[in-house]
Image (cartoon, rainbow, N blue to C red):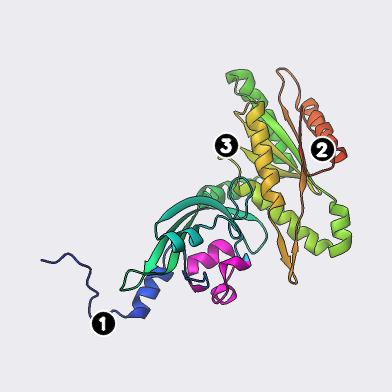
Amino acid sequence: MSRENVIPAGFGKEFYEEIVSQLHDGLYIVDRDRVIRFWNRAAELITGFSAGEVVGRTCSSNILTHVDTEGNNLCTGNCPLSDVISGGQNREDEVFLHHKAGHRVPVSVRVSPLKNEKGEVVGAVELFTDLREKEAVRIRLAELEKLAMIDNLTQIPNRRFMEKEILGRIAEKDRLAVPFGVLFMDIDHFKKFNDTYGHDTGDEVLKFVARTLADNSRPFDVCGRWGGEEFVGVIRNADPDELVRVAERFRMLIENSYLANNGEKLCVTISIGATSHIDGESSESLLKRADSLLYKSKESGRNRVTQG
């Protein structure tokens, strides 16, 4: 008996489109010119872009603006779709896509070529999976809301929570010798940004910066809003080198994110002070040192990490 797939009678194009639309993973199809021809419901939910906004546009128009872990723009360089169309081989990657709201979302992408009856590549299909731990995040946010420890605007932990988190990490280090460090982060020239674009747009920037930090933190790290345009990250089980790597990752992702505003891409950068907890010191001493290092980053030109 033949093992070839056979399409059952009565199951037309609409049936299969409905199945694809119900997938939990984002899926879109492009032709050889990388023009998007299909965009499913999950792709809308993960990216914030509706099918009407993207179908008929090319990937090279930087809709998702994929970047890799080094901050390289894949849509204008080493594009997985372009590689698959030209080479005809499957490809998998973990990248960061641009959400319509401005923040970066970590995704796993799997790209496969589409071939016609002659075996010629006529396009490609990309399936992408949201790597954020959605259910864990939802439960955690619900708990924080009950404790009034979530920032109303950005929906990430607030200063009160972060102060308790630092005290908890100090106690853990005293008991178990688990090292940790603190990142003090501040959006560069934020007052000027608010004066130029208004506070409503400034609030949207605060939200996309917060989401980028929260969505791209390691599972056991916590980032929260300290106040104004300041954020604090508590980085657990990290030596000084790892602390800087995490800080540079945050800095790079913010630098490569943007908020679409009336056809303009609004970008910001952050300056960071990074420091590890010293045995026996208080949370006040730790935060004061991180804050001083942050201002050294500001004085050195901004958009950089200063460790100490």
Nearest to viewer (mark 1 / mark 2): 2
Question: Looking at the image, which is closer to me, 137 or 95?
Answer: 95
Determine whether the residue tagged by mark 1 lies in a helix, strand or loop: loop
Q: Disc 1 designates what residue?
A: 10
Determine whether the residue tagged by mark 3 lies in a helix, strand or loop: loop
Nearest to viewer (mark 3 / mark 2): 2
| Vertical order, 99 against 255 (above or below) | below
Sequence-first tag of 1 and 2 = 1
- Give the mark count: 3
Quadrant of the image containing the C terminus: top right
Sequence-first tag of 1 and 3 = 1
Q: Residue at x 47, y 70 (%)?
A: 32
Q: Disc 3 designates what residue?
A: 220
Nearest to viewer (mark 1 / mark 3): 1
The amino acid type of the residue labelled 2 equals Ser
Question: Mark 1 touching mark 2, by CB under 8 A?
Answer: no
The amino acid type of the residue labelled 1 equals Gly
Please give the label number shown on residue 297: 2
Q: Is residue 117 left or right of residue 66?
A: left
